[in-house]
Image: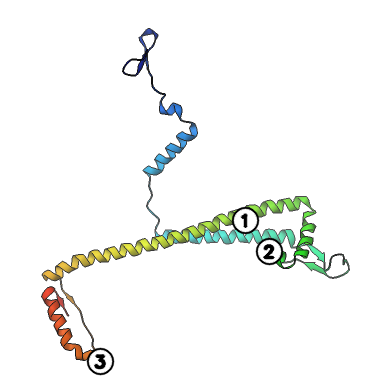
């Protein structure tokens, strides 16, 4: 029977704790993994990257987008570049339509501008099932990777803007701290500063400038106007 301490008497004088199984016994492996991962992440918080580091990452991400686009264009060229179709459907004696130099952008433009020709091109290439399936698989993979890289570029651009704002804020706070430390010293005459006013057509305000200078001198012994 359970004892007040939460232990249960067993034969032979042995006892065991009653009240629920240990937490580890109730957790699945996945739950344990998630908890351990959260603990690790919480104990190793990394400071935000500097703007220079983010700029380097952005440059790398843009290069990746360009490389993937180049691969995609090469895939279109290798798949459709050698295809030649009669100039008009059923016209086997007329000049042939060539797709030399075709890339992803040109392929998309063809679909918008000449749906009939696009249909014939697709029928020609898809007749070879292996080639068509290979093209579709490779194109989908490259488009997906390009989308991820493009999203990374946009994310990094946002982070760079945030880093720039942090830097401006830090600079502003530093300037405020400097002002706060200088003003009392100017008042006490421990620090000196000189302000020069150059007048032109405003020379009739010289008396006003002298009055302001005198007032400032009274408030800030270390300031000369």
The residue shown at (53%, 61%) is 62
Q: Nearer the viewer, residue 52 or 118?
A: 118
Could you say whether the residue bearing mark 2 is in a helix, strand or loop? helix
The residue under label 2 is: 108
Q: Nearer the viewer's eye, disc 1 or disc 3? A: 3
Name the residue beneath numbered marker 1.
143
> Which image quadrant is residue 88 in?
bottom right
Q: Compared to 112, does 43 lie above or below?
A: above
Extreme-right residue of the structure: 93
Q: How is the image coloured?
A: rainbow
Visible in this render: residue 221?
A: no
| SS under mark 3 | helix
Place of residue 19 in the rendered image (x, y in percent of width and height, measured from the top left): 38, 22
In front of the other: 6 or 163: 6
Q: Residues within 10 Å of mark 3 (few under 14, many from 20)?
A: few
Q: CA gap, disc 1 to disc 2?
A: 14 Å
Say which residue label 3 marks. Answer: 201
Q: Nearer the viewer, residue 63 or 26?
A: 26
Instruction: Report the residue at 38% width, 45% height from top.
Output: 44
């Amino acid at each position: 029977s359970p004892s007040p301490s939460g232990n249960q008497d067993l034969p032979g004088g042995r006892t065991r704790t009653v009240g629920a199984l240990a937490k580890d016994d109730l957790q699945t492996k996945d739950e344990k993994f998630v908890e351990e991962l959260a603990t690790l992440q919480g104990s190793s918080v990394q400071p935000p990257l500097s703007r220079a580091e983010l700029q380097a990452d952005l440059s790398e991400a843009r290069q990746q987008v360009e490389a993937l686009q180049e691969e995609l264009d090469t895939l279109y060229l290798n798949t459709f570049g050698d295809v030649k179709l009669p100039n008009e459907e059923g016209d086997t004696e007329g000049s042939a339509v060539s797709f030399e130099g075709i890339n992803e952008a040109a392929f998309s433009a063809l679909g918008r501008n000449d749906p009939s020709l696009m249909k014939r091109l697709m029928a020609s290439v898809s007749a070879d099932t292996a080639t068509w399936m290979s093209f579709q698989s490779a194109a989908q993979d490259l488009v997906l990777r390009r989308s991820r890289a493009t999203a990374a570029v946009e994310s990094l651009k946002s982070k760079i803007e945030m880093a720039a704002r942090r830097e401006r804020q830090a600079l502003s706070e530093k300037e405020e701290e400097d002002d706060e430390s200088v003003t009392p010293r100017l008042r006490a005459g421990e620090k000196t500063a000189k302000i020069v006013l150059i007048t032109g057509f405003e020379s009739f305000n010289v008396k006003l400038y002298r009055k302001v200078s005198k007032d400032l001198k009274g408030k800030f012994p270390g300031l000369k106007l």
